[in-house]
Amino acid sequence: MNLCTLTDKVAIVTGGNQGIGFAIAEGMARHGARIVIANRSAAEGAAAAEELVGRGLVADAIPTDVSDGTSVSELVAKVLDRYGKIDILVNSAAVIVRKPAEDLTEEEWEFVMDINVKGTFLCCRNVGRHMIARRSGKIINISSNVSQVIQPLRSVYAVSKAAVSHLTRALALEWATYGVNVNAVAPGPTITDFNRKFLEEHPQEYRRAVDSIPMARLGEPCDHVGAAVFLASDAANYITGQTLLVDGGSTLW
């Protein structure tokens, strides 16, 4: 028996158009899942789904603003109408603002918290209702190693990711009796399109990040696929409420 197969599972991946989200979407699709990419840009979501289809995988896209409850409700309704069920939810949509805390504006705080925390909650809540009714489901929230350790210029981002990890524990406790597993993956510093330009323009930040990791390299999006596939599979049926750090050991210092 292959415990890590996701054959015939329906998986929503928010922020699945790029970076870690896209890598996880592809990884789950390669393990048999039917992928629905949910992100704000219809063009980017469609392009990502088309890329997966071009690789022989099953995927489509539904434009979604995760910070808007109506948009999330429409996402869930469309997926259920199209596929009849939702087996897996991956909350990867996220934003970051890098600047000194004293220079952060209220608008920047609200922007990060709306996407990273409110968006994760809304998707969990709306998909969770369906999973509770089915008494089955796997939710994987993408947190960060800064939920546990602090890096400079990331105060609001760190707070948002700590909230994601704690929300994961709260929902896991509430939904355990319904057969819904809620876990998180916490990447360490990872090179993605999301931060590549920043690292190129701030080589000192790149060096500091590498020096903070015992394995002496930044992560790649593919480094986080195995953890997500594992947590979505039957191999993780007795695991819930955990934040799995995939960080090259950056929290060991």
Image (tube, rainbow, N blue to C red):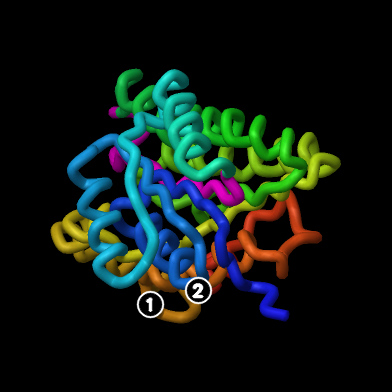
Residue nearer the viewer, 101 or 6: 6
The answer to whether residue 97 is magenta is yes
> Callout 1: 10 Å neighbours few (<14), some, many (20+)?
some
Q: Which amino acid does label 1 sit on?
A: Arg
Q: Which amino acid does label 2 sit on?
A: Gly
Secondary structure beneath label 1: loop
Image mark for residue 147: none
Q: Could one spot residue 143 in this view of the protein?
A: no
Specify the segment rendered in magenta.
Answer: 86-103
- Expressed as whole percent of the image width and height from the top left, the position of residue 179 reads 79, 46
Number of on-image labels: 2
Contact check, label 1 and label 2, Cβ < 8 Å: yes
Q: What's the residue at 72%, 40% (across, down)?
A: 134
Quarter where residue 233 is shown: bottom right
Quarter where residue 25 is shown: bottom left
Q: Is residue 30 above or below residue 148?
A: below
Residue pointed to by mark 2: 248
Q: Could one spot residue 2 in this view of the protein?
A: yes
- Expressed as whole percent of the image width and height from the top left, the position of residue 198 reads 20, 54
Q: In this view, does 66 lie above or below 141?
A: above
The answer to whether residue 12 is magenta is no
Residue nearer the viewer, 5 or 8: 8
Q: Is residue 144 left or right of residue 109?
A: right
- Expressed as whole percent of the image width and height from the top left, the position of residue 60 reads 34, 50
Quarter where residue 70 is shown: top left
Between the C-alphas of marks 1 and 2, the distance is 8 Å
Secondary structure beneath label 2: loop
> Callout 2: 10 Å neighbours few (<14), some, many (20+)?
many
Residue pointed to by mark 1: 217
